[in-house]
């Protein structure tokens, strides 16, 4: 596994306790995002290094999440039906920010849009949706910090799935081992990918995404 890990209890000391931050595993000019799929889709992706195959549909919205524990909460640590396999998808930061620049908030907020009609037009025409949801601890409890997820569809999804992915790793075995520590409440042994706050140097993009400024 290319991803570098650390103890969960160590991560607690350097991650923000609250606020809206893009938190993810970063290496040089890349960032990892996660998705969960049924085995047939995941096996095809790892083997062929792109998302596709007979069981994959480009006609649906597909959500990517840079935060590991948010993906674990959403997939039930790879136990929910249709989410039994976890993929770590490596993408360049440039491509990630390009996707982010196309994003429309999933719900209207007058702080970011001058009118409801303007927001609704963007929502209906653009191919990326953005949501800030409560982040979660390993046991599924909500945190004050918010986690970002991006929904992709149309040509944006196809470009992401076929051209932008630099590496697709199947990390389900790693997830299964960590779930054992969660289930046994042996939190001192739990390890997760090293995650840091993603620094958006483009202040306009950061503001439009609703992310808090790094202090």
Image (tube, rainbow, N blue to C red):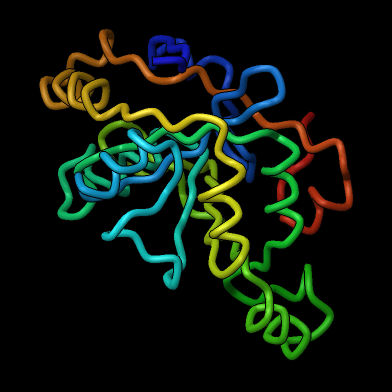
Image height of 160 relative to 128, above or below: above
Residue 34 location in percent, x, y? 43, 40
Q: Is residue 7 above or below residue 92?
A: above
Q: Compare residues 24 and 33 and report the one nearer the observer.
A: 33
In percent of width and height, residue 85 lies at 24, 40
75 with respect to 105 (left or right): left
Quadrant for the C terminus, please.
Answer: top right
Q: Is residue 164 above or below residue 128?
A: above
What residue is drawn where x is 44% and y is 66%?
Answer: 58
Q: Dividing the picture into quarters, in which one does residue 154 lie?
A: bottom right
At x 68%, y 85%, the residue is: 120
* Residue 202 horizontal side relative to residue 192, left or right: right
Residue 157 horizontal/vertical position (percent) = 55, 59
Q: Residue at x 71, y 48 (%)?
A: 211
Q: Nearer the viewer, residue 180 or 126?
A: 126
149 sits left or right of 7 in the view = right
Q: Residue furthest bottom?
A: 117
Q: How many marks?
A: 0
């Amino acid at each position: 596994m290319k991803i570098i890990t650390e103890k969960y209890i160590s991560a607690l000391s350097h991650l923000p306790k609250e606020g809206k931050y893009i938190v993810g595993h970063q290496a040089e000019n890349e960032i990892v995002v996660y998705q969960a799929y049924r085995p047939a889709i995941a096996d095809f992706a790892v083997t062929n290094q792109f998302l596709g195959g007979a069981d994959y549909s480009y006609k649906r919205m597909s959500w990517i999440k840079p935060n590991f524990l948010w993906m674990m909460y959403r997939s039930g640590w790879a136990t929910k039906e249709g989410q039994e396999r976890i993929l770590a998808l490596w993408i360049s930061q440039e491509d990630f920010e390009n996707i982010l620049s196309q994003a429309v908030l999933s719900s209207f907020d007058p702080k970011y849009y001058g009118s409801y009609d303007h927001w609704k037009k963007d929502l209906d025409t653009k191919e990326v949706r953005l949501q800030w949801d409560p982040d979660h601890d390993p046991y599924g409890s909500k945190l004050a910090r918010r986690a970002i997820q991006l929904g992709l569809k149309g040509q944006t999804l196809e470009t992401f799935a076929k051209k932008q992915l630099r590496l697709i790793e199947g990390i389900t075995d790693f997830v299964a081992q960590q779930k054992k520590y969660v289930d046994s409440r042996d939190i001192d042994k739990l390890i997760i990918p090293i995650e840091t706050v993603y620094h958006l140097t483009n202040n306009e993009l950061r503001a439009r995404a609703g992310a808090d400024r790094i202090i």
